Amino acid sequence: MTNNSPYADRRARLAAQLGAGGIAIVPTAPERQRNRDSDYLFRHDSYFFYLTGFTEPNAWLVLEGNGRSTLFCAPKDLEREIWDGYRLGPEAAPHALGVDAAWSIDELDKQMPRLLENREVVWYNFATHKGLETRVDQWLQTVRARVRYGAICPEEQRDLCGPLDEMRLVKDAHELDVMRKAAAISAKAHIRAMKLSANMLRKGDDVREYHLDAELLHEFRLNGSQYPAYGSIVAAGANACVLHYRADVAPVKDGDLVLIDAGCELDGYASDITRTFPANGRFTGPQRALYDLVLASQDAAVAATKAGARFTDPHEATVKVLAQGLLDLKILDAKKLGTAEDVIEQRAYFPFYMHRTGHWLGMDVHDCGSYVEPSQIGETSERKDPLSGETITNRPSRILRPGMVLTIEPGLYVRPTEGVPDEFWNLGIRIEDDAVVTETGCELISRGVPVKADEIEALMKA
Ligand code: GLY
Ligand code: MN
Ligand code: MN
């Protein structure tokens, strides 16, 4: 890897924010035991990967304010490599990863105090990595023990999440390229699951949620994705009203809707797509009415997503459309509640739409990055929540910038409720796409899978 790699570029940009006397410590994720001698599948730490591109366990990056980088990694060991697999090793790391120096991980406790000596500020990610504070403390104790020999011990510790989260929030060209590919694979996987559902029902098969889950996994792996970016939700019928349902064994019945929220992770980057479709390929009247309402609310949110808008603007646009639609469909009673503005004012839509319309997306499915606008920190206003009666402190929502990536995922979930027409009972609908913010709007990178009801029906035809 050359020093022109995106990782070297990110290290240089981060180093410039550490200050001349600053030093940053970034470990990768720990390996986790599943039972006895079996571990959970290893997944690197996102911050560490962002700065190195290195996916082996047992590795740490140290970055100094002058830009110098040091990697600690597992040493070459033929026996361990025979059992566990290839290791890059510290000898090859500088050339392969573009770091300035590399040590065996066995040297960590010896070298780290030396690296920390005579620095002013130690940076590491707070509250992300269990036990990291204790490790840093131990190394600083070793430095402190040398103070009487003239060593200077850093006096300040700072949260590296501050600068790193801001960097990760705005994706660079390399990241956008991978994210487009991840979303395209996930879109194909959704199409595959939709088709299987209708085809199996046409044949009279006993379709289960796990059959559709298997299609998703197949398409992810077929295209080189390492694993799902999060536990796939495959929810048939009323299960769609359980927001964090997981693909299970429930039957997928003719006449049901199926909600699939699934996205692959590709080379460290998540995608996050939800589609809701009729199991047999044809929407009923009430299903279609509710579906078209959610889609209209998503259209409004998409139109509100552009550079200069606030993160909350798509949510507000969604809620306006849903509030009016819930009144029109008589799911909410206009005689009791009044207009759409009144519904919003009283948050009366909340029993049917109880989540936000999106979140940042990146290496993590719920990616890092502040949702509060940094240039307006300290500006607050208060309002009383109409449902709980609590006083809520509002902070100015983040202003969107080109290169930020967020999901747009409105939904409606209608549990059996007195006063609500029973034709809508047990319908759960969510439509979720992944949007890259541009100067003039947003690029939906997940639209490889259709979203219009007619197009979904067309693709599910025999
Ligand atoms: N799949 C998680 C989410 O949509 O936020
Ligand atoms: Mn999401
Ligand atoms: Mn999702």
Image (cartoon, helix red, strand yellow):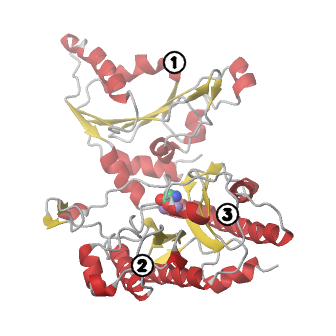
In front here: 145 or 58?
58
Q: CA distance from mark 2 to mark 1?
A: 52 Å
Q: Amino acid at mark 2?
A: Ala
Task: Please tell me whether residue 147 is drawn above or below residue 374 in the rendered image.
Answer: above
Task: Identify the mark at residue 301; answer none if there is no mark.
Answer: 2
Quarter assignment of residue 344: bottom left
Residue where numbered disc 1 is placed: 106
Give the crowd class for mark 2: few <14, some 14-19, many >=20 residues within 10 Å. many
Q: How much space separates mark 2 and mark 3, taking CA atoms?
A: 24 Å
Mark number displayed over residue 185: 3
At 44% from the left and 81% from the top, the residue drawn is 297
Foreground pick, 36 / 245: 245
Q: Nearer the viewer, mark 2 or mark 3?
A: 2
Q: Earlier in the sequence, mark 2 or mark 1?
A: 1
Q: Disc 1 versus disc 3: distance between alpha carbons?
A: 40 Å
Left/right of residue 124 with respect to residue 258 in the rendered view: left
- For badge 3, the amino acid type reads Ile
Quadrant, the C terminus: bottom right
Tag count in the figure? 3
State which tag comes first along the sequence, 1 or 3: 1
Q: Is residue 249 above or below residue 461?
A: above
Q: Element at badge 1?
A: helix
- The answer to whether residue 182 is left or right of residue 388 is right
| Residue 402 image offset from top left, x and y in percent | 41, 71
Q: Is mark 3 within 8 Å of ligand 3?
A: no
Q: Quadrant of residue 205?
A: bottom right
Residue 133: give x, y in percent of width and height: 32, 28
Where 81 sits versus 453, above or below?
Answer: above
